[in-house]
Image (spheres, grey):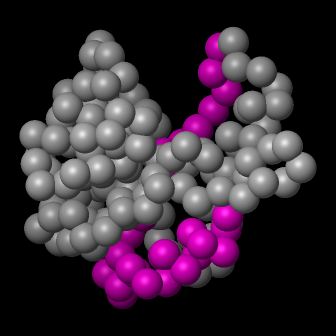
């Protein structure tokens, strides 16, 4: 079983079985802390506990600063990734950090626009209706393709 994780407050988690079939997904749950959104670690932890099996391995997108991104938004993004990585460690789930370049190359998305990941995921999982939604579908698509990266490299 593989878990793909697109961290960040607008990200998602996706679980695939050993045959590459979609098992479950979760749009990243958030809570408000003042005026900021933060990842709801309790909800992510509950989802992981419900979907983790002994043979599970997670693939977490390795995030970094992006040119032009503000300090506050970068902190929020890094905080979200840290919450998820801490949960993986705390729950004893083995994981691998995957750069966006690596999983996108494996999925054939280098040089393509942002929505290409959603289009590819729709080709692979045509029954998965969340992929029809532009924003939410993009997050789930990225998480699925990150998990598929693990399927090939494991």
Asked which quadrant contains residue 52, the reply is: bottom left
Residue 52 is one of the magenta-drawn residues:
yes
The image shows residue 85 at horizontal and vertical percentages of 62, 61
Q: Is residue 149 visible?
A: no
How many numbered discs sit on the rendered protein? 0
User: Magenta segment, which residues?
Assistant: 40-67
Asked which quadrant contains residue 114, the reply is: top left
Q: Image point 38% across, 79% down: which residue?
A: 51
Please name whichever residue, 69 or 96, is drawn nearer the observer in this view of the structure. 69
Residue 94 is one of the magenta-drawn residues:
no
Please identify the quadrant where the C terminus is shown. bottom left
Q: Is residue 43 visible?
A: yes
Compared with 92, 11 (above or below) is: above
In the image, 50: left or right of 39? left
Q: Image point 29% across, 50% down: which residue?
A: 130
The image shows residue 39 at horizontal and vertical percentages of 67, 57
Please identify the quadrant where the N terminus is shown. bottom left
In the image, 72: left or right of 101? right
Please name whichever residue, 48 or 96, is drawn nearer the observer in this view of the structure. 48
Q: Image point 79% across, 38% down: which residue?
A: 75
The image shows residue 146 at horizontal and vertical percentages of 34, 48
Q: Image point 41% across, 43% down: which residue?
A: 136
The image shows residue 50 at horizontal and vertical percentages of 43, 84
In the image, 107: left or right of 114? left
Furthest toward the right, the residue is 34
């Amino acid at each position: 079983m593989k878990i793909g994780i697109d961290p960040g407050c607008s990200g998602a988690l996706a679980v695939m079985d050993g045959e590459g079939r979609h098992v479950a997904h979760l749009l990243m749950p958030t809570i408000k802390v003042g005026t900021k959104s933060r990842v709801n670690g309790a909800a992510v932890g509950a989802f992981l506990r419900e979907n983790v099996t002994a043979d599970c391995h997670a693939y977490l997108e390795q995030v970094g600063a992006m040119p032009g991104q503000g300090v506050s938004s970068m902190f929020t993004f890094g905080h979200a990734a840290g919450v998820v990585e801490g949960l993986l460690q705390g729950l004893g789930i083995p994981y691998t950090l995957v750069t966006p370049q690596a999983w996108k190359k494996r999925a054939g998305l280098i040089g393509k626009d942002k929505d290409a990941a959603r289009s590819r995921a729709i080709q692979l999982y045509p029954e998965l209706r969340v992929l029809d939604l532009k924003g939410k579908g993009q997050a789930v698509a990225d998480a699925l393709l990150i998990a598929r990266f693990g399927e090939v490299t494991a």
